[in-house]
Image (cartoon, rainbow, N blue to C red):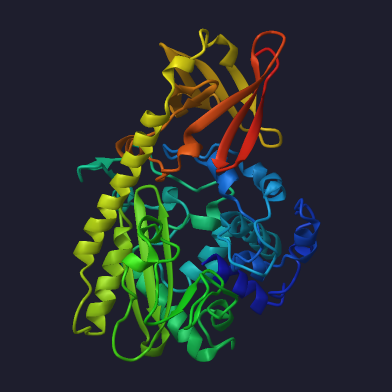
Amino acid sequence: MTAAAVGVLVEEGKLNWSTPVKQILPKFGQKNSHVEDLVNVADLLSHRTGLSDVVPLSYTFQGDGEFLLPKSQLYPIFESLPTSTSIRTGWQYLNSGYAIAGKIVETLSGVSFRDHLNATIFHKLGMGSTTLRPSDILEPSSLALPYASLANGTPFALPNRQVFENTFMEPAGGVYSSVNDLLKWSQSLLSSLDYGASTNASLPNIDYIMSNQVPIDNPSLLERSYGLGWVRTQLPGTIGLIGENMDILTEQEVPAFDVGQQSKLLVYHQGSTVGYYGCLLIFPETASAVVVLTNTAALNDVADWIARAYAETLFGKVKPTDYIGLATTSKDRLLELYQGLQRDVDEDRRPSTKPKSLTPFVGTYDHPTLPFSIEIVHDSSDLALLFQGKESHRYSLRHFRDNTFEWTLTRDETALRGRYDVWDPSYFRFNFTGRTSDDHFNKLQWSIIPEEPEVFTRRSGR
């Protein structure tokens, strides 16, 4: 939808797909000067900037439905992003790119991102149940409540909904909608493809938006690429590449998706936030679409499995895939990953190396460039960490070995706190270094990405 909003502005002649971002947003910057000079709106929307935003997303969101960085931090965050590959040579999912695209929409349209989408898409297409802001919904009871699944399958009602309103991530994942509205959206996309980029289309430039922009998950004998917000796959082939099932299972464990004897092009997108998962499959050749929305963070990406099953039924596949079996396997594997995480911590813990005093670790540690801090406090016989110093974001910090502490979470703890699944052990470890003259540690290292620690500095007097 963000890409479609930009497509309207392209149709109005306010920019081209190749217009450099710097030309539109004077405050835009990137520490990689090559990216700063070259990156354009199509690069942002096709995730081919070569940048990664895994680290700042951890500062932005640590569960419980709350964004921890203010809207004003978008430009500093984007400027600090590390380069993972050369621009336009590969695909790297980048939520921050869509946040920048939202700023482009606001700058060129002269109205808020929400007002632009309302006028050019939602109201125009009769999508009366679609909004960026839950506060706009006249009947709040009609909005599905978010849930998370505990390890035993019990649903847990999340006390807080992750709301994107008034955050820089609103253009990157803040739309609330219904199955009926997304079918209207799909119908408009399909009808617009018939017209190409002409003004007769209900949505302009959809042919370009859905076209091949960058390869994804190569090598692939058949077509597999990314457009502007859409994955393109020639069937039979591997799908679900931006969902969680393919993080839990290997590509070899999931059968190639196939809906019939003739090869078909599938254009799709998957999305999730805590408590909600969705999947939209579009088959342009038959003007078909499958929409699945769920209101739980389950033990796998259940919207993905359901959408595949519906598509196989839609096209009358003779031997349907066992998606109950795949759901069971992926559920078991997710729990095994969490059990393995805890087992590794228990096996590698060295209680004999625990420091005699925890006082040297206590203090507030600040990120070097972003307004993000981690406060370390005494908590019974161990420590506790508070992201941004908030009691609502307090986690137990237990001794691991020497001057390293861990805050490893079980799957149920992850669900209860409204968090995304993480099973990388380095993510949950803080290493303290640089003991000072006042007998405190000066540095806190956090390896959000393995082997690439972020270094926080202890605040003077804290």
Q: Is residue 86 above or below residue 32?
A: below
Does 55 appear above or below 221? above
Please tell me which residue is depicted at 38% across the width and 34% down the height of the picture: 409
435 lies left or right of 259: right
* Circle count: 0
**What residue do we see at 60% from left, 17% from top?**
363
- How far across and down, in percent of the image, does residue 380 sit? 41, 11
Classify residue 267 as left or right of residue 120.
left
**Does any portion of residue 417 appear in the rendered image?**
no
Closest to the observer, 42 or 191: 42
Q: Position of residue 218 (x, y in %)?
A: 53, 73
Comparing 30 with 282, the one in front is 30
Nearer to the camera, 61 or 320 = 320
Give residue 46's position: percent from left, percent from top: 59, 69
Residue 407 vs residue 359: left or right?
Answer: left
Q: Position of residue 121 (x, y in %)?
A: 50, 70
Pick the quarter of the image with the C terminus.
top right
From what the image shows, is residue 221 above or below residue 278? below
Which corner quadrant of the image does residue 71 belong to? Answer: top right
Report the front residue among 127 and 67: 67
Classify residue 287 by image quadrant. Answer: bottom left
- For the question of whether residue 120 can be seen, the reply is yes
What residue is at 50 percent from the left and 38 percent from the top? Answer: 426
